Amino acid sequence: MFSIPMSYYKNTLGTLGCSLAVLMGILTLKTFPTNAQSQNPPPNSPLTVRSDIQEANSETGVVTARGNVQFFYPARQIQGTSAQAQYFSRERRLVLTGDVYVLQEGNSMRAETMTYLIDEGRFIATPESAQQVESIYLVTEAEDSPPEPAPVSPAPPLDTTLPTPQF
């Protein structure tokens, strides 16, 4: 039987705590408003990730969550699920894989893989082979008046005279 020195545990826990702090607390986000009411999230907005297993690498700055992943980002009203999530702290990018479902402000998207670019506030979704990405968007109708059809100008009159053939 072998024994592991206590310093190993302390270093491992310290590294894990440091990396999780990166994931949970260093997300100072700049957002591009999606509508007139949007506001920038406050600095250090929390992103909560729940999963069966989480690993953090302090050298690469990558935090990986696997198994029944659930994530919540209230500052941008984003929540979702996936089989795996990887947060790349240096690139400020969240990569979700495996039956990904994301819900934001009532709009939803399903894909096999989805990348969220934090600084741009943009999702990039890709499907499984021979499948499609599905998005559902809430479209609000103006209550004041029904939509008006676009104006159509009449077509110009047809020239019904035929040219005289030249033989």
Image (tube, helix red, strand yellow):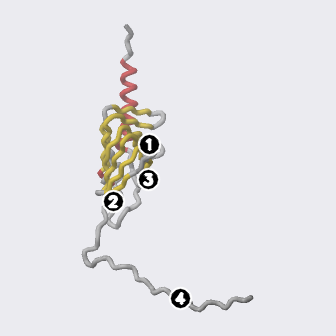
C-alpha gap between disc 2 and disc 1: 29 Å
Disc 2 or 1, which lies upstream in sequence? 1
Disc 1 or 3, which lies upstream in sequence? 1
Q: Residue at x 45, y 87 (%)?
A: 154
Q: Position of residue 145 (x, y in %)?
A: 27, 79
In the rendered structure, the answer to whether residue 127 lies left or right of residue 140 reads right
Q: Which mark is residue 158?
A: 4
Q: How many marks?
A: 4
C-alpha gap between disc 2 and disc 4: 43 Å
Contact? badges 3 and 4 (CB < 8 Å): no
Q: Position of residue 46 (x, y in %)?
A: 32, 46
C-alpha gap between disc 2 and disc 3: 22 Å
**In this rendering, the label closer to the viewer, 2 or 4:** 4
Please state which amino acid type lies under the numbered disc 1. Answer: Ser
Contact? badges 2 and 3 (CB < 8 Å): no
C-alpha gap between disc 1 and disc 3: 12 Å
Please state which amino acid type lies under the numbered disc 3. Answer: Asp
Disc 2 or 3, which lies upstream in sequence? 3
Residue matched to label 3: 119
Q: Is residue 144 above or below residue 1?
A: below
C-alpha gap between disc 4 and disc 1: 65 Å
Q: Position of residue 111 (x, y in %)?
A: 39, 47
Disc 3 or 4, which lies upstream in sequence? 3
Tell me the SS state at disc 2. loop
Q: Quadrant of the N terminus?
A: top left
Residue matched to label 1: 89
Tell me the SS state at disc 1. loop
In the rendered structure, the answer to whether residue 154 lies left or right of residue 68 reads right
Tell me the SS state at disc 3. loop
Residue matched to label 2: 137
Q: Is residue 106 above or below residue 1?
A: below
C-alpha gap between disc 3 and disc 4: 55 Å
